[in-house]
Amino acid sequence: MKKIVITTSLPNGLGPVADIDGRRPLAELTAVVNAACDDVESRQEKSVVVLRLSTTPASSRAWPGVVDIREVNRWERAVHRLERLAAMSIAVAHGVCGGPALDILLAADFRIGAPDLLLMPPINEGHFWPGMSVYRLVQHLGVTRARQIVIWGDDISVDRARQLGLIDQVSNDLPEAVHTAAVLMGRISDQEMAMRRQLLLEAASTEYDQALGVHLAACDRELRRLKNGDAATEPDPASSVLDSASSVLDPGKGGGS
């Protein structure tokens, strides 16, 4: 497939805007998400990435179509890459959204929906698509609420989505809402925020003793950052925190005092 380059940007160079059209082939959607990640990672200044979910026909619930498991794996890796970016991500949706909508919404840091938004879960012959959206639903909503969505596969109105936390803001003026969110989030869009996001994502599935080491390492990193007056420069803050957790719990291992 020809390499995709994101050509749409937010005003004032705040970051790229990627269109996620659920009617497109899975390989193309994967390329779009990766292209958006490439764009953000190539920027030196703080930025955000906006993902606009296109509407899909109300009769088109089946997804992802005829694909092989390698294509599914590439898609899941692209979405995971998105949710680990140092830059903050904003998903915006209106109308009927199906296909990859849940994957993108659950991976994004902030989600904006129009009053007419209707989320259609991906259903194939009566069964919810067993991709990583199931995993993220449990992380975000807990097993009980996630079970209701996965078993029944009912459409989710914008009010229900807001109640569940699948949507953070409902707005009649999507461009203005996106611009405001991009400006505000752009100020905190950096590696330090990415580290905190990672702590949140791992909290639901991490035992206390293991989490303690990771959080102490994060606190140690923050204390050093504040003392030095600037941000730490490790390329992957989440990984650096994990790597240093044992040395924080046991100073003798890391040469600490």
Image: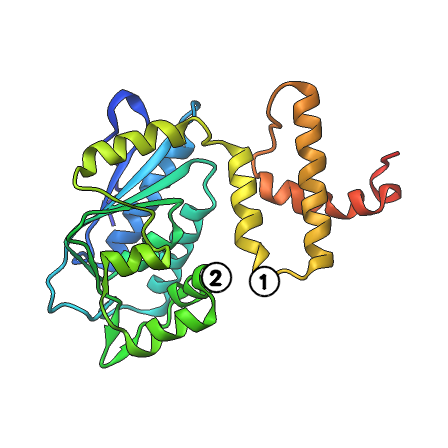
Q: For this view, does 210 lie left or right of residue 231?
A: right
User: Between marks 2 and 1, how big is the CA–CA gap?
Assistant: 8 Å
Whether residue 257 sits left or right of residue 53 in the image: it is right
Contact between marks 2 and 1 (CB within 8 A): the answer is: yes
Q: Is residue 147 left or right of residue 66?
A: right
Residue that badge 1 annotates: 205
Residue 147: which quarter of the image? bottom left
The one nearer the camera, 159 or 22, is 159
Which quarter of the figure has residue 157? bottom left
Report the amino acid beneath label 2: Gln
SS for dot 1? loop
Residue behind mark 2: 139
**Looking at the rendered structure, which numbered label has been put on residue 218?**
none
Identify which amino acid the numbered label 1 is placed on: Ser
**Could you say which is closer to the camera, residue 53 or residue 137?**
137
The residue depicted at 33 percent of the width and 33 percent of the height is 181
Q: Residue at x 54, y 50 (%)?
A: 200
Position in image of residue 176 (x %, y %): 21, 32
105 w.r.t. 99: above or below: above
Above or below, 10 relative to 117 = above
